Image: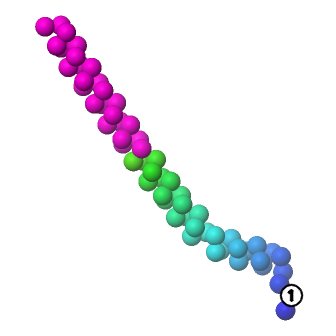
């Protein structure tokens, strides 16, 4: 039985497709979590800075 190279490539793509989708989902989740954490850190730093300014100005 002769396996065509194109058929082999299609089979490989089909088996790899779920892996790609899963890794894309994981990467997207990581990026959104990182973005959320960075936003929280920036907000915390800004609020701390505002507190310091308020304390200094009194």
44 relative to 52, above or below: below
**Image coords of residue 13 (percent x, y):** 68, 71
Residue 33 at x, y = what percent? 39, 48
Instruction: Tell me the residue that label 1 is attached to.
Output: 2
Q: Residue at x 61, y 69 (%)?
A: 17
Q: Secondary structure at mark 1?
A: loop
Left or right: residue 1 compared with residue 27: right
* Residue at image location 34% in from the left, 30% down from the top: 42
Give the residue at x 20% y 20%: 51
Q: On the rendered image, what quadrant is the C terminus found in?
A: top left
Q: Residue furthest bottom?
A: 1
Question: Residue 20 sits in which quadrant?
Answer: bottom right
Q: Quadrant of residue 14?
A: bottom right
Q: Is residue 52 above or below residue 22?
A: above
Q: For this view, does 55 lie left or right of residue 11? A: left
Magenta stretch holds residue 43: yes
Q: Residues within 10 Å of mark 1 (few under 14, many from 20)?
A: few
Q: Which residues are magenta?
A: 34-58
Is 42 one of the magenta-colored residues?
A: yes
Return the residue nearer the eye: 4 or 40.
40
**Residue 25: percent from the left, percent from the top?**
49, 59
Please, is residue 14 above or below residue 33 in the view? below
Q: Is residue 32 left or right of residue 46?
A: right
Location of the N terminus by quadrant is bottom right
Q: Nearer the viewer, residue 3 or 37?
A: 37
Toward which corner of the image does residue 11 lie, by quadrant? bottom right
């Amino acid at each position: 039985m002769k396996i065509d190279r194109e058929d082999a490539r299609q089979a490989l793509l089909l088996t790899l497709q779920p892996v790609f989708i899963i890794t894309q989902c994981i990467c997207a989740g990581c990026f959104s979590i990182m973005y959320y954490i960075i936003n929280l850190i920036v907000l915390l730093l800004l609020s701390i800075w505002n507190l310091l300014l308020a304390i200094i100005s009194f």
